């Protein structure tokens, strides 16, 4: 990781714009382009057209602005259709923009950075990214990944940015900053190629390093692979920085965001070329799209206990991105699979994000009805869900002052392994996520740290990779090497990782299945039915809790009871902050129903409980029992 090639160009946005409570965004692909795109992407899936058109009118906009109290919307400008088709979508964007802005909603215009629809005048384009055999690489159905070195593609991207700024949008949102082909981590090994192997990309890498782009990647064992992956990630950041600079040149007030897709829970550095730390410097607000919509599955059911959450992602990202504001857009199963979430689940996600120092981007699009018809959050029948979102948005907006000028106060810290995490993903990711999940499940607050400077207030430091040699740790910090604990040793390299020939064979098979999935209806039905799509592409193994015995060994060394201590039945997120003289203790219930929690303090305290679910009340003493529906914030001294 380290310093990226991009420096912030436009400076910070006006102070509170992207602060918690002030920033209440909704992700809302709609209009004719989205109708067309859903049909293409999901092979003629039914789409509720009237809902998709209504979202751009006063009726749809009012539902978002009033009921859900949203004040930012992500609207599509450019899906990547050829211009003779897409002209209609640009016009729809230009018409929707003033309707949103008049209702007090600012607008990000969407640019598709890395792929295009192979149809019409785009069918003959030679700007597709090439795999090592010169073949194009699919992005869903009917679309190919593009090569960012191709001059025509770069011109095209600049035109899209120009169109959005010219229309009067408040911001430009860059989706899918992914470079070329994408290797998959499967069965403990990296399979497939990364990036683009066209003559121009190969020449550029040769010029920079004197090396050829590796056809099979081995980030752990091969320095050339690591060198290439760093070069590719820098290319991604540089391209985004150039486009951001161009947008700011056109309008210095324009705000920039990008989709830093699932940058924590999956090895996005290797798969896509996403370097979150470097990309943060280009953006005014970070947006991480992921599969972390909170969900708790206890031990009664088959399989491991599983706690899907965004705390892992947000705590990690916060440590990587410096002062750039953070937002997150979590899914449940994924695009094309999710019904509109219940009001309670939206509230859990909003509360979890706020507790962790971030903003939820409310997912408002690419939902399906029970019969598979595509719909949006703006559809008339989702009034209850919009109201539930609005209750939380208004509550946060009125209390925005509680979420500024705070210092994280968790005493337990987890050291981020840095570049070693993507280099040795198979060995280190299970330890890093496993330790985080174990603490989370036990109600022990923790934060991610990157450097010795982050250790203020830390009493226990857990690490999964060796500590940097130059670190001088104060003696009072207890140090725990997670990999040395019983049951926590990293898994040995998998069978496929040890046998390069078999790995190449498996990679060939996986690549063929990938191509068939996006090409043939029968293959997609077969693969979806087998559950492979969900397991392989959507479900992160990082959310499975380690077995109970393994968790116990870690909790034993983390040791002594820490205060405040929380007693609960099912998992609750516990996030402490310090704001001036006051202490904040955020509690978010991950369960499907309310539960009673007891908070036990080290000494007698006095304070107040604030919650969007109930009236505020004061408390004092060494103990507090409260009924926690979704979210409560204890403020005390
Ligand atoms: Zn290329």
Image (cartoon, helix red, strand yellow):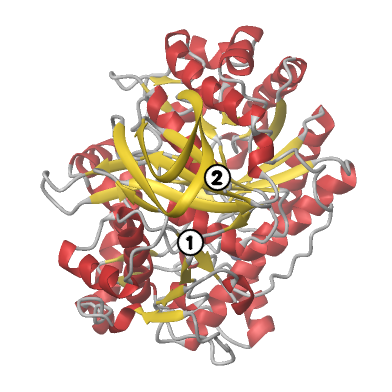
Q: In which quarter of the image is the N terminus?
A: bottom right
Q: Can residue 496 be seen in this view?
A: yes
Q: Where is residue 405 in the image (x, y as percent from the top left)?
A: 70, 50
Q: Is mark 2 on a helix, strand or loop?
A: strand
201 relative to 499, above or below: above
Q: In which quarter of the image is residue 40?
A: top left
Query: Mark 2 Cα within 10 Å, few/some/many (few <14, many 20+)?
Result: some
Q: In this image, 387 relative to 596: left or right?
A: right
Any part of residue 75 in sight:
no
**Secondary-structure class at tag 1:** helix
Disc 2 target residue: 636
Q: Residue 268 carries which label?
A: 1
Give the label on residue 588, or none. Answer: none
Residue at 15%, 48% in the rendered image = 299
Q: In this view, does 128 lie above or below 389?
A: below
Percent position (x, y) of residue 595?
A: 29, 34
- Image vertical order of residue 595 relative to residue 327, above or below: above
For this rendering, which residue is in front, 174 or 464?
Answer: 464
Task: Locate residue 625 relative to residue 281 in the image: left or right.
Answer: left
- First of labels 1, 2 by sequence position: 1
For ligand 1, tell me if the residue under mark 1 lies within 8 Å: no
Q: At which x and y percent is residue 489?
A: 25, 80
**Foreground of the two, 59 or 346:** 346
The location of residue 199, given as percent across then percent down, is 61, 71
């Amino acid at each position: 990781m380290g310093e990226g090639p991009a420096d912030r160009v436009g400076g910070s946005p006006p102070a509170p714009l992207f602060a918690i409570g002030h920033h209440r965004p909704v992700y809302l692909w709609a209009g004719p382009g989205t109708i067309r795109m859903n049909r293409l992407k999901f092979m003629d899936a039914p789409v509720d057209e009237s809902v998709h058109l209504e979202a751009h009118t006063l009726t749809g906009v009012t539902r978002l602005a009033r009921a859900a109290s949203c004040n930012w919307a992500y609207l599509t400008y450019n899906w990547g259709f050829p211009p003779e088709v897409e002209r209609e979508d640009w016009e729809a964007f230009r018409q929707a923009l003033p309707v949103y802005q008049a209702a007090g909603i600012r607008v990000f215009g969407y640019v598709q950075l890395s792929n295009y629809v192979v149809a019409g005048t785009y069918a003959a384009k030679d700007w597709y990214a090439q795999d090592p055999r010169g073949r194009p690489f699919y992005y869903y159905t009917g679309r190919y990944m593009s090569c960012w070195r191709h001059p025509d593609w770069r011109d095209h991207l600049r035109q899209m940015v120009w169109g959005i700024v010219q229309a009067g949008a408040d911001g430009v949102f860059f989706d899918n900053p992914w470079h070329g082909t994408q290797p998959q981590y499967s069965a403990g090994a990296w399979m497939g190629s990364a990036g683009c192997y066209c003559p121009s990309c190969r020449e550029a890498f040769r010029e920079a390093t004197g090396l050829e782009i590796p056809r099979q990647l081995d980030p752990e064992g091969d320095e050339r692979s690591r060198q290439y992956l760093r070069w590719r990630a820098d290319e991604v950041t540089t391209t985004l920085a150039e486009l951001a600079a161009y947008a700011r040149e056109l309008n210095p007030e324009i705000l920039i965001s990008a989709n830093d897709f699932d940058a924590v829970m999956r090895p996005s550095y290797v798969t896509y070329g996403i370097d979150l730390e470097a990309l943060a410097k280009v953006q005014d607000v970070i947006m991480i799209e992921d599969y972390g919509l909170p969900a708790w599955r206890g031990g009664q059911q088959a399989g491991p206990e599983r706690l899907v959450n965004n705390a892992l992602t947000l705590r990690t990202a916060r440590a990587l991105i410096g002062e750039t504001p953070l937002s997150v857009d979590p899914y449940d199963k994924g695009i094309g699979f999710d019904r509109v979430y219940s009001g309670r689940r939206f509230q859990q996600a909003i509360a979890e994000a706020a507790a962790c120092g971030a903003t939820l981007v409310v997912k408002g699009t690419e939902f399906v009805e029970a019969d598979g018809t595509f719909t949006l959050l703006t559809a008339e029948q989702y009034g209850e869900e919009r109201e539930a979102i609005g209750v939380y948005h208004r509550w946060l907006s009125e209390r925005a002052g509680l979420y500024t000028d705070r210092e994280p106060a968790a005493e337990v810290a987890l050291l981020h392994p840095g570049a070693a995490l993507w280099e040795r993903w198979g060995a280190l990711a299970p330890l890093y996520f496993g330790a985080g999940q174990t603490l989370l499940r036990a109600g022990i607050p923790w934060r991610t740290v990157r450097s010795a400077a982050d250790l203020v207030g830390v009493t226990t430091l857990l690490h999964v990779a060796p500590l940097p040699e130059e670190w001088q740790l104060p003696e009072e910090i207890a140090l725990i090497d997670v990999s040395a604990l019983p049951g926590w040793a990293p898994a040995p390299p998998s069978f496929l990782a040890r046998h390069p020939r078999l790995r190449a064979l498996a990679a060939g098979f996986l690549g063929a299945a990938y191509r068939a999935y996006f090409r043939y209806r029968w293959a997609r039905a077969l693969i979806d039915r087998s559950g492979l799509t969900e397991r392989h592409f959507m479900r992160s193994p990082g959310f499975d809790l380690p077995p109970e015995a393994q968790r116990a060994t870690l909790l034993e060394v983390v040791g002594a009871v820490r205060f405040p201590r929380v007693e609960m039945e099912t998992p609750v997120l516990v996030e402490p902050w310090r704001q001036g003289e006051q202490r904040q203790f955020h509690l978010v219930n991950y369960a499907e129903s309310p539960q009673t929690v007891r908070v036990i303090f080290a000494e007698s305290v006095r304070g107040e409980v604030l919650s969007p679910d109930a009236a505020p009340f004061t408390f004092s003493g060494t103990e507090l029992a409260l009924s926690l529906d979704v979210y409560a914030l204890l403020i005390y001294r």
